[in-house]
Image (cartoon, helix red, strand yellow):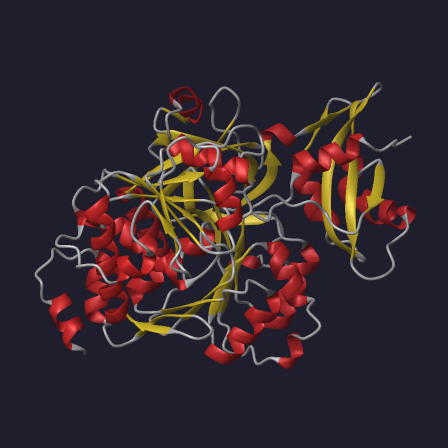
Amino acid sequence: MSQDATRTLARGYADSPMRAAARRFADRLALADAGRTWTFAAFDILVDRLAGGLAARLAEGERVALYMRNSPEYLLLSTAIERAGLVRVPLNVRYTALEVRNLIADCGAAAVCHDLRTLPALGEALAGIASAPWHFSVDSEDACGGPTYGELAAAAPIDVDRSSADLSALSSINYTSGTSGRPKGVMLTRANWRAVTRNMMLDRRISGDDRLGHIGPLTHASGTYFQPFFLRGAASVVVTEGTVEALLGAIDRFGITGFTCVPSLLTRVVNHPAIDSHDLSSLAWIGYGAEPIPRNTLERSLARFGPVLTQNYGLTEAMMTCAFLPPADHFTGDGELRTGSIGRAYSFVDIVLRDGEGRPVPVGEIGEITIRAEHVMAGYWRMPEETAKVLREGWLWSGDLARMDAEGFITLAGRSKDMIISGGFNIYPQEVEACLTGCPGVREAAVVGIPDEAFGELCVAFLVADGADAPDPEVLVAWAKPRLGIKTPRHWRFVADLPKNSNGKLDKPAIRRMSAEIDWR
C-alpha cells in the first residue's frame, strides 16, 4: 500500500461502509474505464480530496447537481458529495436546457458538475438564472465561480467523513421523468440509501469476484448498483461510450461478469450483428428492468446466455429494491416461461395490492401496488400536497397496477392512468404488450386507447417488426385473438421505432400524440 494510502486509512475516521470497504480491499481493483484504473485505496484517497475541496466551499446540506455522461468521475464525485455531507442531484443528460434550468432553480443547486459534452446545454440553462451556481467540468479546466475539478482533486483531504453522521439527513434529490407534468424531486435520506444497499446485498447475486459493467446512465439504476458491489470488493467498469459495441468489447476485455440495462438495450444486444465475434463467457448475470421486456428478447437472451437474467422492479419514490425475479423464478414449476412478472418482494419490503378504497384485493385480481419499506422516500422536495397523495398511513401508492398470485409473484398490468375502458371492460396495456411481443415477427409493442362513440375507447397497437417483413394484420389477429380475446387491438400500425423518454422507457404520451394524428377508420 502507498504511503498516502497508509496515512488516509490511519486518520482515525469513524468508518462509513464505503471507507471500511476501502480499507478491507485496499489493493484490489475498484474502478476502471477503457484507459484508467483505481484501486480501492486510490479511490478512497481521491474521494477524500474531492470531498475536502467541496466541503471547504459548501455548507452541509447544500445541493450539488451532477449533469454529466457516464465516467469514473461521476462515481468519484457522487461518493465525495455524500462524504462531504452535501445533497446529490442527478440530472439526466437528455434533459433540455430549459429542463436543466428549471431543476437547478427548483433544488437551489449551489454547484453543478458537468463535462464538455453537456457544457453547451448547461451554458444555455445558466444564462436564464440571475445568480448562476459554481460549475466545473470533469474533463477540462473549465470552471466558473469556484475551483476546477483538478484543484478539487488536489485539495486537502476532508477531516471528518460526514456520510454516517446523521442517517436521517437528506442524501439525494432524484427527479422523476416528468412525463405527466412538472418533475417531482424525490427526497431520499442516507437511511433510505442504506436500506437500498442492504436489500441488494441480501437478496441479489453480488460477489467480490464480480466485475460490474456500467452501460446504463449512472444518474439512474446503473449508479445505484455501484455501492453494494463496492462493499463486496467487486470492481466497476464504466463503459463511457454507452454503445452496445463498446459494452461487448468491455465484456471481452475486462471479463465483465454482469451488467444491468433497460430491455430496449438488451434487445439491441441480443440482435447485434457482432455478438458472435466477442467472448462473452464471463457473464454470470444480467439485470433488466424499468419497462416490460418483450417476450422475444427474453427468449433470445435465455437462449444466448442461459438462465442468468434477473428482473428488478422499483420506482424513484422507492428506489430500485421493491421486487425482483431471480434466474430460477423465470420459469414456473412446469417449466413454462414466466413472462410479464416482476417477481416477489424483497425480504424487507411489504407489497400489498389495493383497490381504490384502500382494501387489499383478492389473489389474482388487479390492484394498485402499495409499498412499505425503509427505502421509501421521505417525500417530494417542496411539494407537500403531492407527497400526501402518494404517502398514506405509512404506505407508498405507486400508481402501478398488477396481479399477485398465491405464491406472491407479481405481474404488472400497467399504470393506472393508462388503463383503457372499452365497452365496459378494463384493458391493461402492459398485459397486451407482453402478449404481442411473443408473436412471431414482432420485436416491440405499445398499446394505447383511442376515443370511440360506441365503445368509449378502442385498443390500438403500434409495433416494431422483428426483421424486414412485418406480419399482415390478419396474421396478427389470428395469433392474438385466442390469447387476448376482447383485449385484442382493433387496429395495428407498424413503425420503424417506438418513442422513448429520457430514461429509455416507452414514451406513452408521445405514442398517444402519434395516435391522435392518425385516421384509424
x and y, in percent, of residue 217 in the image: 49, 54
* Residue occupying the point 43% across, 32% down: 129
Residue 224, compared with residue 24, is above or below; it is: above
Q: Which picture quadrant has residue 449?
A: top right
Residue 408, compared with residue 37, is above or below; it is: above
x and y, in percent, of residue 501 in the image: 61, 43
Residue 260, compared with residue 415, is above or below; it is: below
User: Foreground: 335 or 473?
Assistant: 473
* Residue occupying the point 61% across, 70% down: 245
User: Foreground: 413 or 361?
Assistant: 413
x and y, in percent, of residue 71 in the image: 44, 61
User: Foreground: 205 or 410?
Assistant: 205
Is residue 519 in view?
Answer: yes
* Residue occupying the point 57% across, 81% down: 279
Left or right of 463? Residue 133 is left
Give the quadrant of the N terminus: bottom left
Give the quadrant of the C terminus: top right
